[in-house]
Image: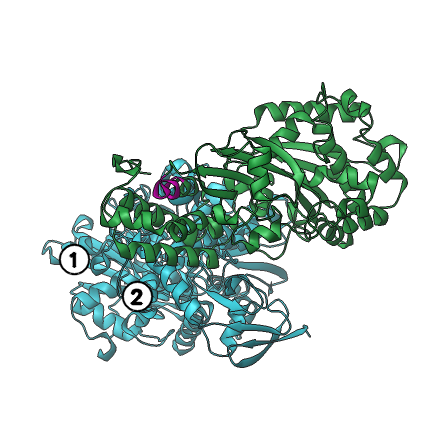
Amino acid sequence: MAEMINLTIDSYQVQVPKETTVFEAAKKVNINIPHLCYHEALSIYGACRVCVVEVEGRPRLEPSCATAVEEGMKVKTNTTRIRRARRMIVELLLANHPEDCLTCERNQICELRKLAYDLGIRELRFEKGRKYHYEPDLSSPAIIRDPNKCILCSRCIRVCLEIQSVGAIDFVNRGGKTQVLTFFNKGLNNVECTNCGQCILACPTGALREKTAVDEVWKAISNPKKFVIVQTAPAVRSAIGEEFGLPAGSLVTGKMAAALRRLSFDRIFDTQFGADLTIMEEAHELVERIKNKGVLPMITSCSPGWIKYIEHFFPDYLEHLSTCKSPQQMFGPIAKTYYAQKISVKPEDMYVVSIMPCTAKKFEAQLPEMNASGCQDVDAVLTTREAARMIKEAGIDFVNLPDEDFDKPLGISTGAGVIFGATGGVMEAALRTAYEVVTGKTLEEIKFEQVRGMEGLKEAEVNLNGLNLKVAVAHGLSNARILLEQVQKKESPYHFIEVMACPGGCLGGGGQPMPATLEIRKKRAASLYCEDEGKAIRKSHENPAVIALYKEFLGNPLSKKSHHLLHTTYTKRSRY
Amino acid sequence: MKIVLKNIRKEGYLPGINSYMTQGGYEALKRALKTTPEEILSEIKKSKLVGRGGAAFPTGLKWEFTRKSRELPKYVVCNADEGEPGTFKDRFILEKDPHLLIEAMIICGFTIGAKDGFIYIRGEYFKAYDILQKAIDEAGTNNLLGRNILGSDFSFEIHLYRGAGAYVCGEETALLDSLEGKKGQSRVKPPFPTFAGFNNKPTVLNNVETFVNIPEIVLKGGEWFSQIGSPSSPGTKLYCLSGDVKAAGVYELPTDISLQDLIEKHGNGVCGRLKAVLPGGVSSNLLTSSDLNVKMDYSSIQQAGSMLGSAAVIVINDTHCMVNLAGRCIEFFDYESCGKCTPCREGIKRAREILTNIAQGKGELSDLALLKELQEVMFDTSRCGLGQSALNAVSSCLEKFYGEFKEHILKKKCKLGICSMGKDF
């Protein structure tokens, strides 16, 4: 039992464990102290000074996020002095902020705008107009950084370093000239940025956003020559409802399909089909590697943020990666070959759009090697947020839509495909299939609880016909680094590792609705496991559309055709 | 009464070890090594010596906190990043009597149980750096640094580290970050350096001037020291007298000297007519002729509404425009703010803008209230001393010379013809 501290916050007595901050203690009495640089998942920075409070006996206001509670402490969170200071600080930020809220990406969810409103700032007393005009960083195919909207709260820097252990951005210069930049301002695309987009989720303003593909997709939809297919990733259905005011984790698979059909996509397909296909290839690859003493541990390759991370930080260990493409990139060439032939459409007349919880998928789709169909396999990638924007733009009443189904055959999927969206899901899906491939027996208990949940690192052991298969799961790249360092030291006890770049897996991806707190991520995960439970078929190798695909087109998993269409190679990259 | 300049003021004194030894150098260390750390600590506490960097924290207490901490290793750090405009006292010691500082740091190391000391020296102090490095080498050759100092069980090293020119690195936690190789930005306090300083280990961090009082206290006792100068902050103080004064320079005087005596008796009087005095550099509030009787110790100056800081006493005569002076002060802070916290980074920019407008005849009366509010909020919410005090001089110019600001705004004119140039600060 931790030592308890008693303090007074406003007129309330509060008892909290030692080393709690005043900020956290205030939550106990339902006071959410206004703040900007504080972020629940990150270290304390204490620099925005918005969360200041009065502590009796201290000469100055104290930042509540960086002030530890003390026995008998008397705190006031809302006095004239505090309100004046908070207003002034936000006013100072606004004095140096572009006045383009009406056209800003973050219009509805900007923390700075909301704070200014909440604090009652109705007039700007400082001279209008910015003194600095910086060039936005447009180098990346996934993420745009506009330093003009940056308030230097360091949340992007901290998430990049602390959660992802990447450190692609940091402060440069001093004082009023301080900026967040990449190494020598080379641009996000030319440094070790993994395109994971966690910085976007962490940013309180519009300084970070995805590079949008909305207009390209509209253009394709209105082009009569194009046959436009959309595929939606598993994690999207558990989160897109949040964009329309539904509670976090609302499962809206049917409404989403209905909305996409109303956007005039020619076919509404499911990336979960691609996920089932991935499992077929990946489970067989694992079995092959174990049988033939191939490179182990084998590590999953579904997460393009993770792929870029290992390419930059552990370039000598790329042979550990499964050669399987991600579900998005398996779906693309299958749509443009197998399905295109079925419906007699030329691959170049087909336009594949994917809706992803992810910003790194934008990078992945434009890689030059992703053209197994003879042209770019996936033409445009939309984040969950962009898809929601299109639905809003079209005036679709999302919340009241009836449930509709995906189209066949590439919209058919299993429960194993669904759980790809949560950390541990790929592992669980792979185990469901690998077990039956190796043992030839039916797996009765298909839930692998040990690999579920929000622990950063998880492990499990599964008996496969006498082989004790050791597996591990990591989400968040700093956790992945721990497993990779074991591999580096030749101390890794595992056969198979799942890595997802984002905390919580894809459901916590950089393209998802904001905010994405731990609580919200948990709810999204719960809704994916719920969809899995409700599926009639829950093992990838039992997906009838996948079975038909192998029978009619691919032959067997790991066949020559499979290798050509569904497997890839990786690139050694330097840090900068 | 000379304590810290006792050697320097002697004719023909050189910064080398021979000169120092001739004047009884390292005798305090020899005595210290024969006594116990507790005894030294007790003398320092008795002396009532307070930190000379500006914060006036009791030195004995600081050393005691660090000594009592159970974390290891412990460190001694000397703040020689003298950067306040108008301050040039530490350089004087570093260049002319480096062994006095070295001896003091060794005694500190012995007292708190540290094996390593660092001197963080201002980047621009090229000459002082060379002299200090030479002195450290000399001390090493003479077994005053290194293993088993003077045959005792005690070993200690001093490392010289050069800053890169940021004023904010004079703030102790920013200094520590810089010393660790990071960007110099203030840390969240608490924890204080005495518990978590260099590499998050217990650290005594004192100013050059604070340290150099130590050998004399060890030799003559804390009781003796506590009788000198003001009872609240006893001893002598190095005053850096500059500006419109006839004899500018560094003066070591007991802390109960009055501002009047400092300027008139030691500085030979004001050039022209006195308008104002900044007693602690550009971070301090202005004093005027009505404050001349104030005693030049920390608490007396604080009672007079200003602060002694590092005792950069800048004398200002009536040929200076106070709008211009305020602008010049803010220009300095705009350049030196580290940019970490909002009030300092953004507030200074806006203050500079407002003062520029006033100086160019584009100001409004409401600007003056806004400036005042800005100063109060920055004082209340900035992370470190830089932002907290950045607008002190500005707001006291405003308070004490309100008429001049009003004239600039209403008559769009600078009576002294200084601001009417249309030049940006």
| Chain letter of disc 2 in the image | A
Left or right: where does residue A407 sit relative to residue A473? left
Majority secondary structure in the magenta region: helix
Q: CA distance from mark 1 to mark 2?
A: 38 Å
Question: Earlier along the polypeptide chain: callout 1 or callout 2?
Answer: 2
Chain painted in green in the figure: B
Q: Position of residue B257 (x, y in %)?
A: 63, 43
In the rendered image, which residue does mark 2 sit on? A121
Q: Residues within 10 Å of mark 1 (few under 14, many from 20)?
A: some
Residue positioned 36% across, 57% down in the render? A358
Q: Residue furthest top?
A: B12
Q: Are marks 1 and 2 on the same chain?
A: yes
In the rendered image, which residue does mark 1 sit on? A218
Chain painted in cyan in the figure: A
Query: Can you say whether B260 is above or below B342 in the image?
Result: above
Residue positioned 83% across, 35% down in the render? B29
Q: Nearer the viewer, mark 1 or mark 2?
A: 2
Position of the C terminus of chain B by quadrant:
top left
> Is A521 a magenta residue?
no
Q: Position of residue A201 (x, y in %)?
A: 38, 59
- Magenta range is B321-328
Identify which amino acid the numbered label 2 is placed on.
Ile
Q: Nearer the viewer, residue A446 or A442?
A: A446
Q: Position of residue A444 (x, y in %)?
A: 52, 75
Q: Image quadrant of residue A176?
A: top left
| Chain letter of disc 1 in the image | A
Q: Nearer the viewer, residue B386 or A379?
A: B386
Res A195 visible:
no
Q: Residue furthest left?
A: A224
Name the colouring of the figure.
by chain
Query: Can you say whether B51 is above or below A201 in the image?
Result: above
Res A248 visible:
yes
